Image (tube, rainbow, N blue to C red):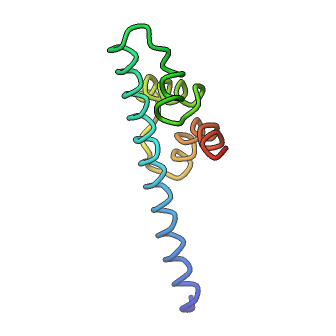
Amino acid sequence: MNELETSSIEEIRHLQERIVENAHKAVLDAERIGQILKEVRERVPGTDIGQWAESNCGITKSTAYRYMQLFEYRYKIPTVGKLQEAYTQISCLTKVVKEVRK
């Protein structure tokens, strides 16, 4: 194996590790947002949490509900150990990302 191949392999492996790490962090952040939204909804009776999130946090109602759903089902999501598992975990965030970019 030549030097170019070796350095390419090393860089690809490093980048792949970062992708998995960042995906894991994104899922944890989204879960935390869901937890906070759920807590607000529970502590402030009568709050339309979707409207509250839209007015105060700049996220759409549907995104707020997706975050809460992600939090509620977090134990059913496998731990990120492989890239495919990372993709599975963040697939539910795809719509969230699209909405945030609007």
Q: Position of residue 4 (x, y in %)?
A: 58, 89
Percent x, y for residue 59? 54, 34
Residue extending farthest top: 46
Q: Nearer the viewer, residue 93 or 5?
A: 93
Picture quarter with the C terminus: top right
Give the vertical position of 45 relative to 66 (above or below). above
> Is 95 positioned to the left or the right of 65 in the image?
right
Which residue is pictured at 49% across the width and 28% down the height? Answer: 53
Where on the picture, by quarter, is residue 62? top right
Q: Which quadrant of the figure has residue 12?
A: bottom right
Give 21 or 40, whichever is nearer the viewer.
Answer: 40
Work out which residue is located at the far front of the displayed protein and give it: 55
Instruction: Give the camera-side residue of 15 and 26.
Output: 26
Residue found at x 38% / y 35%: 32
Kindly identify the residue that appears in the image at 38 percent across and 8 percent down. 45
Q: Residue furthest bottom?
A: 3
The N terminus: image quadrant: bottom right
Count the numbered circles shown.
Answer: 0
Q: Position of residue 51 (x, y in %)?
A: 53, 21
